[in-house]
Image (cartoon, grey):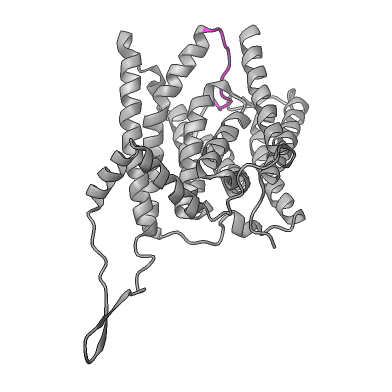
Amino acid sequence: MRRQLSLNDSGFIFVIGVVVTSLLQTILVYALQNVGTFAGMSIGTWVAYPIGSVGFFLTAFLYTKIRKCDFLYIARVKTKPRAISFILIPVIAVACVVAFYPLTAMFIRFLTVIGYKGGVSAPTEFTPGIFILAIVIMAVVPAFGEEFFMRGTVYNGIATRGSWFGVTMTALLFMLMHGNPYQTLFQFFFGVVLVLVFIISDSIWPSIILHFLNNFISILVTAYIPQIDAINFGALWPLYDILISIGGTIVLVFLLYFFYRLSHSGKDAGNDKFKIVTDDFTITAYAENEKKSNPIKDAFIFFGSLFTKNGWKKLNLKLFDLSKVEYVGKRPFMQEISFWIALIVVSLEWVLTLILGIVQ
């Protein structure tokens, strides 16, 4: 069975997944529009959430099976990340909110200025039972469906053009497929983090947990801490938003570095290295101890390297090595056409949503 997808494969999977799920969700919303609402959200929307996520998963699974691809390997289902690395996932989730939400708030203010009217579908009335139901439908199910679809499958083919192309394009498609201008900046940057976590851990499970925690935090804030959205820094709000985002991003970079260290430290334990020493009479072999490093110092060195061209080059090579895909590079247009069609389709959908939100 094939263990790698092509860029064209990723394009086909994405287009099929988005078109099929969008049609199913639209049909359900209209079919159930007169049924009423539950907890302030239409029944159609409640049903559409899980249907969309299941559609994404089935698209990825069935396409890889039809094409005789090893779905479990491509999605990194069977690989077991080091348990200790999971302790950083909740912290990374919080750091993403701190780093990206202020930028999102700034962008929403800009959309308001140009006259865009929109929102995010979510319940407005909460009881403990409704809260748990919302967590299952709007956090658990999407985390599984979207991660197996985007990081577990679509990324594999896109990464054949290089790691940064794979990371940025997967995040861009993830952002656009949500079709909501309000979520644009957050979904893109969060999509980048999700791909990096998937690559670093060599497993789908950490990215699923991170995705779930992000959705969980969003629902928790909506249900029980709505005051956060009302925070106002007055005339200095742009400066505070920018400073908070910069600080949060710096913390996030360090967290991802330590996540890498925890995910990979000890994997080579037991593979002793030997050095041969000869003299006139004997040949002696002894284990060569690896030089111990200071993780804090190394983290600052890594952070500083991000401001150099050589540092980005090394990071690019490391990410590609961790991705475990074969480099193909740029191919003739017809061998990549489905990917570019996918990008154009969701881009046009996003633009259309923005225009309709302004003129309505």
Q: Which quadrant of the structure image shows residue 120?
A: top right
Taking the magenta stretch, the answer to whether it contains residue 118 is yes
Report whether residue 128 is seen.
Answer: no
Q: Position of residue 335 (x, y in %)?
A: 72, 42
Instruction: Determine the residue positioned at 72% across, 27% down.
Output: 29
Taking the magenta stretch, the answer to whether it contains residue 105 is no
313 versus 307 height, above or below: below
Residue farthest to the bottom?
A: 281
Chain part drawn in magenta: 114-124
Q: Position of residue 192 (x, y in %)?
A: 48, 38
Q: Quick one: quadrant of the N terminus?
A: bottom right
Q: Position of residue 144 (x, y in %)?
A: 58, 46
Q: Which quadrant of the structure image shows residue 243?
A: top left
324 versus 345 height, above or below: below
Foreground of the two, 310 or 164: 310
Q: On the rendered structure, is 8 left or right of 218?
A: right
46 versus 118 height, above or below: below
Instruction: Determine the residue positioned at 56% across, 32% down.
Output: 172
Q: On the rendered structure, is 313 left or right of 272?
A: right
Foreground of the two, 277 or 249: 277
Considering the whole magenta stretch, tell me its main secondary structure: loop
Report whether residue 221 is seen.
Answer: yes
Q: Position of residue 111 (x, y in %)?
A: 52, 13
Foreground of the two, 40 or 97: 97
Q: Quick one: quadrant of the C terminus?
A: top right
Foreground of the two, 27 or 287: 287
Instruction: Determine the residue positioned at 27% across, 44% down.
Output: 301
Q: Which quadrant of the structure image shows residue 227?
A: top left
